[in-house]
Amino acid sequence: MKICVLDVATLGADLDLSPLSAVGEVTYYDTTPPHLVRERIAGQDVVVINKIKINAETLPEGKDAPSLVCVCATGYDNIDLDVCRTRGIAVSNVVGYSTESVTQVTVGLVLSLVTHLSAYTASTADGSYTHGGCANRLIPPYREISGMTWGILGAGKIGSRVAEVALALGCNVLTCRRHPDGQSVDLDTLLSNSDIITVHTPLTPETRGLIGKEAISKTKRGVVIVNMARGAVTDEAALAEAVLDGHIGGLGADVFSVEPFPEDHPFYALRNHPAVLLTPHMSWGAYESRARCLAEVAQNIMAFARGEKRNRVDLIR
């Protein structure tokens, strides 16, 4: 079985790749620019990707087309499923591998923003604490997270795990789900009542731009917002404006509409803002998480070779 991995650099240089080597003859590319995707896929049985876009322009046709595309992620919005279905190409994803990793980073960002840790560490790093003449420093003031209301937009595996941690920290938790379960609240209720909002919902036509200017206007002044879903779930320009005018008290994001974001992106000017923490789409990538992901991809390939339907997102309608 011939397998090619088009962007292995996104999986980390420290990762043991032997689970893939055990199931076929593998060709690895650190990254693949769009104009080379079709050429590198041609003649392969299986294509493994993380961030590469798979669509009509990048997929070869006929006998050169792969039988299976495996994405090293839960989300698959970078793959045109309709094209894959039309051409008889199976697509599989990986579910649940990054729950603990993303939860850990989500909570870390929230705690850092609520506690203003970047401002406090900066005061020791720049020498102002040493030369300030006071044994302690309490500017900017911060509050205890216990008793705050933490709103969770998208309560799947990750959102539900974040909710458990938020409850353990003493927060009141509100959840807003795509499919209400009788315990969740609507979006307006979550927006207007939450001190903290973390976003975990998939990117769909319905969720694109969901947290925009109108939604932000319904939130409390000083709200902390952390996006861990997809950049395009939010209106990034509206978020940046709300940070600059002081309505948003803390902004965290690990995902962006363009990755990496360019200098003309709304967040570039905020990258050193004391109320902003931006991370380079790393929350999914604890070593254990990446190892689980690759092992699952190998299992998906072996299952497909046996004629089994494992994690087949092309079968979802």
Image (cartoon, rainbow, N blue to C red):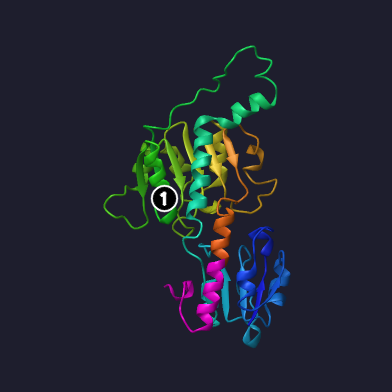
Q: Position of residue 199 (x, y in %)?
A: 46, 48
53 up-or-down from 199: above or below: below
The crowding category of the residue bearing disc 1, from other C-alpha atoms within 10 Å (few below 14, some 14 to 19, many at least 20), is some
Query: What's under tag 1, amino acid-wise?
Result: Arg
Q: Position of residue 2 (x, y in %)?
A: 66, 81
Residue 317 shown left or right of residue 106 in the figure: left
Instruction: Give yes or no for residue 215 being in the magenta stretch.
Output: no
Residue at left offset 66%, top offset 38%: 269
Residue 293 is at least partly visible in this image? yes
Question: Mark 1 — residue?
Answer: 161
Residue 48 is at least partly visible in this image? no
Q: Quadrant of the C terminus?
A: bottom left
Q: Quadrant of the N terminus?
A: bottom right
The answer to which quarter of the image holds residue 151 is top left
Q: What stretch of residues is rendered in magenta? A: 295-317
Q: Secondary structure at mark 1?
A: helix
Q: Position of residue 72 (x, y in %)?
A: 57, 65
